[in-house]
Image (cartoon, rainbow, N blue to C red):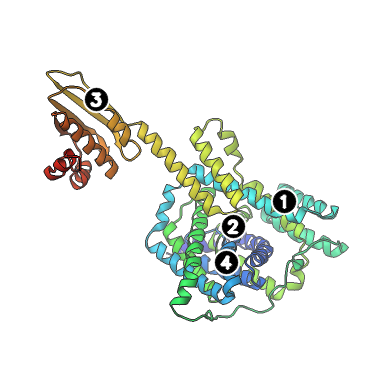
Amino acid sequence: MFKNFKIDWISNIRGDMLAGIVVALALIPEAIAFSIIAGVDPKVGLYASFSISVVIAFTGARPGMISAATGAMALLMVTLVKEHGLQYVLAATVLTGLLQILAGYLKLGDLMRFVSRSVVTGFVNALAILIFMAQLPELSNVTWHVYAMTLAGLAIIYLFPYLPVIGKIVPSPLVCIVGLTAFVMMFDVDIRTVGDMGDLPDTLPIFLWPDVPLNLDTLLIVLPYSLGLAVVGLLESMMTATIVDDLTDTGSDKNRECKGQGIANISTGLLGGMAGCAMIGQSMINIKSGGRGRLSSFSAGIFLLIMVVFLGPWLKQIPMAALVAVMIMVAIGTFSWRSIIDMKKHPLSTNIVMLTTVVVVVATHNLAIGVFVGVLLASLFFANKISRMMVVKSDNVENDSCEYRVIGQVFFASADKFIDSFDFKQVLESVSIDLSAAHFWDVTAVSALDKVVIKFRREATQVNLIGMNQATRTIVDKFGVHDKTEEIERLLAGH
């Protein structure tokens, strides 16, 4: 236990603390923007980012991953805020947490194994595009100062690491933010700053129970929103955890992460914050700034609260151009440039899944929909591929008998091919169907076997099924009708 504590908390103190400062600075404008999207006061998003970051540091399963208020979650709350107000949003946030904890105990995190690599790549690329597109409003209809500051910020981010010693110690995004802020304050440059986005809170969050009636009507109002928030939050968190796993070459317990996200959302709902989840952009900032342990998430939340409550006047001076430069760096680093080269050697189906995921996510601005479409498409391609691997071979007819040998997987996608592989027009006394190299997976496959057997028997041909494995025999015995006299008589009679 002490070994895990040492690895997660104190093995990388300097890196985690510095990365936490960078993440906290980048979280502020995003939390304010997401609050505006949801239609709530900026402090709701800021309190959420603080509480989720701190709580998930203790309850989550993926060290180095940053969770806070997110745009995808904010979009799902818009209607609830308009129709019922903030207190119902807080109630929905608490219920979201409870549903996510339940998902953890039901081990729904294990479903991540059904998400193919092509879907993950598409998710990453789409998110990189969305992160970049989100910066465009800050670069539209602005003076040349903004472009100059943004380019200067990118130059600092990419060139500072090449400096001897100090370039390896201090994260370049932090240098970018501090340096450009100092420049703006020193020369009084007229440029959009964090303070222009909204008022910052000047008090610490307090514990409060959502002021809603505890009855069935309230549950019916918030449950649909909470279900959507829970699904989207878990999906984004699981995908982000998978990406951070790859970046750090470590594993994580997805079911524990579900529970951790749930506890964090319950906590934020009771502190006046809105629901949130893992953020791939901030997680990438954290990893690239040297953050690896739980301390990075914890320090990000603590620094965020200290900055907005106690250092507000200074914080408001941060130019948005500096944060735009950081997020453009994140977008460039997040995009899988290798995937473009790999398209030449990857199968067409893999490329289609990846590109479809990208297009759907970018078009809908909904990561969950894109991932669902990608997983569905990948499943269809897989089913089609497996169905083609099923073959039925027949030996020469001897003494009015024939043997068919079935090889491969028989299921809903290959059932018709299975039936069409038999010649029912041959005049035969007996037919043997060898199933030793086959496996029947579902009711559709069993129904196909029934049709084959009954069609042969209609032609007065004796049918022998041989070589069924135990799993196939179990499903055939349970759902098959070809060996049940009453069912056969009913089918033969045409009823």
| On screen, residue 374 above or below 393 | below
Seen at 28% across and 32% down, the residue is 419
Q: Earlier in the sequence, mark 3 or mark 4?
A: 4
Which x, y percent locates residue 199? 72, 72
Q: Is residue 313 left or right of residue 36?
A: right
Residue that mark 1 sits on:
157
Q: Amino acid at mark 1?
A: Ile
Label 2, label 1: how far apart the Cα atoms are? 16 Å
| Mark 3 touches mark 2? (CB < 8 Å) | no
Checking the image for residue 423, the label placed there is 3
Q: Earlier in the sequence, mark 1 or mark 4?
A: 4
Among the 4 quarters of the image, the one containing residue 469 = top left
Label 3, label 1: how far apart the Cα atoms are? 70 Å
Among the 4 quarters of the image, the one containing residue 466 = top left
Q: Amino acid at mark 4?
A: Met
Label 1, label 4: how far apart the Cα atoms are? 35 Å
| Mark 3 touches mark 4? (CB < 8 Å) | no
Seen at 78% across and 66% down, the residue is 317
| Mark 3 touches mark 1? (CB < 8 Å) | no
Q: Is residue 266 visible?
A: no
Residue in the foreground of this view, choosing between 56 and 103 = 103
Checking the image for residue 77, the label placed there is 4
Which is more foreground, mark 1 or mark 4?
Answer: 4
Q: Earlier in the sequence, mark 2 or mark 4?
A: 4
Q: Amino acid at mark 2?
A: Gly
Which is more foreground, mark 3 or mark 1?
Answer: 3
Structural crowding at the residue carrying mark 2, measured as other residues with C-alpha within 10 Å and reported as few (<14), some (14–19) or many (≥20): many
Query: Which element is circle 1 on?
Result: helix
Checking the image for residue 419, the label placed there is none
Residue that mark 2 sits on:
291
Label 3, label 2: how far apart the Cα atoms are? 66 Å
